[in-house]
Image: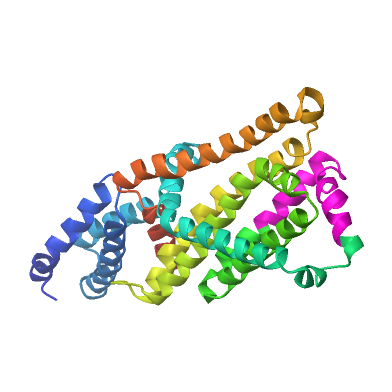
Amino acid sequence: MDLDAYTAAHRSDWERLESLASSGRLSGPEADEMIRRYQATAAQLSAIKTTAGSTRTGDRLSVLLSRVRLRFTGAPRNVLSQFPRFFLLQLPAALYRLRWLTLAVAVATIIIALAFGSWAFGNPQVLANFGSEADLKHLADEEFVSYYSENPAASFAGRVWTNNAWIAAQCIAFGITGVWVPYVVLQNAQNLGITGAVMFAYDQGDAFFLFIAPHGQLELTSIFVAAAAGLRIFWGWVAPGRMTRLESLAHEGRSLVTVAVGLIIALFVSGIIEGFVTPWPLEQQIGPALGWSIKIGIGTLALAAFLVYMLVLGRRAHRLGETGDLDEFEAGARRLVAA
């Protein structure tokens, strides 16, 4: 091997690798480029050592490769230091990307619920299929309201949080199938419509809305977002654009991890409201009008905070170039370690 000629042929590649290793924060493409150049340089160093033994050029490349490995596998950043970026940029940006799909799921749910509710309310024979006259009357007069207060508030809040988080997780995990999200949306809307029809049929329509409104605003919106996330990953597989299907799924999947964390928090808040605010007998203490206004107002404030976070902060993060994906530099490090 003519070492001088070999060095001259690859000097620009080594200098580029050194430049990447010395730079600050790397973008996703730059991290991928560093991995490729690291692997190529490692092969070139092996060739030099095999044919020329120990040389100054080989020693310099060994030091360079050590710097690159340290760049990828060195001590991780303090987890606490990453929280501000996650909550101020990554999470709102990931939610913002789902805004139109979330709206579409919400509209579809409302339409389906109204269709089932109108159909059942206008046809006594249909209502009869869901239970006897005594059972339906018991549901409307007692069971629907007592459901929110028959268990201790803390355990009830934990139970509904777990149940709703499980539904959201199903939407995200099985969204790629393309059928699970529509099934969940249909079931949720059907249950909502049929329950409303029963309540209205027995003159308890006001109780239906009053007991759903405090927690239901944020809870249903969170489920809509989860459904939108599931549809997004399905669409990433159907129409990957310039990416391969696997690349598109990986990109959407990393974003959905971010969304899942946000929904766990949002559903925890809605669970607290459902467990402590919805059954709170405030209307018996200060009057129905003011009591229910306060309870529904708490739910409305929670929803408003979520929407501001999703749309206002999300739009700002999106304009700053944030996609809601996991840190692509750290993802590149994991790929390097796996290699």
Q: Name the residue at 47% across, 60% down.
A: 104
Instruction: Say which quarter of the image contains residue 329.
Output: bottom left
Q: Position of residue 311 (x, y in %)?
A: 42, 44
Q: Is residue 59 magenta?
A: no
| Between 46 and 71, the one nearer to me in the picture | 71
| Between 121 and 3, the one nearer to me in the picture | 121
Q: Position of residue 249 (x, y in %)?
A: 43, 69
* Residue at the farthest top position: 286
Q: Name the residue at 70% across, 29% down.
A: 289
Instruction: Say which quarter of the image contains residue 235.
Output: bottom left
Q: Position of residue 89 (x, y in %)?
A: 40, 43
Dominant secondary structure of the residues highlighted in magenta in the image: helix
Q: Is residue 77 visible?
A: no
Total number of numbered discs in the rendering: 0
Extent of the magenta region = 136-165
Instruction: Say which quarter of the image contains residue 32.
Output: bottom left
Rendered view: 154 above or below 260: above
Rendered view: 229 above or below 79: below
Q: Is residue 149 magenta?
A: yes
Q: Position of residue 118 (x, y in %)?
A: 65, 63
Left or right: 116 with respect to 172? Answer: right
Left or right: 337 with respect to 178? Answer: left
| Between 312 and 262, the one nearer to me in the picture | 312
Which part of the image, by quadrant, shows the C terminus?
Answer: bottom left
Q: Name the residue at 60% across, 52% down.
A: 220
* Residue at the farthest right position: 134
Which part of the image, by quadrant, shows the N terminus?
Answer: bottom left
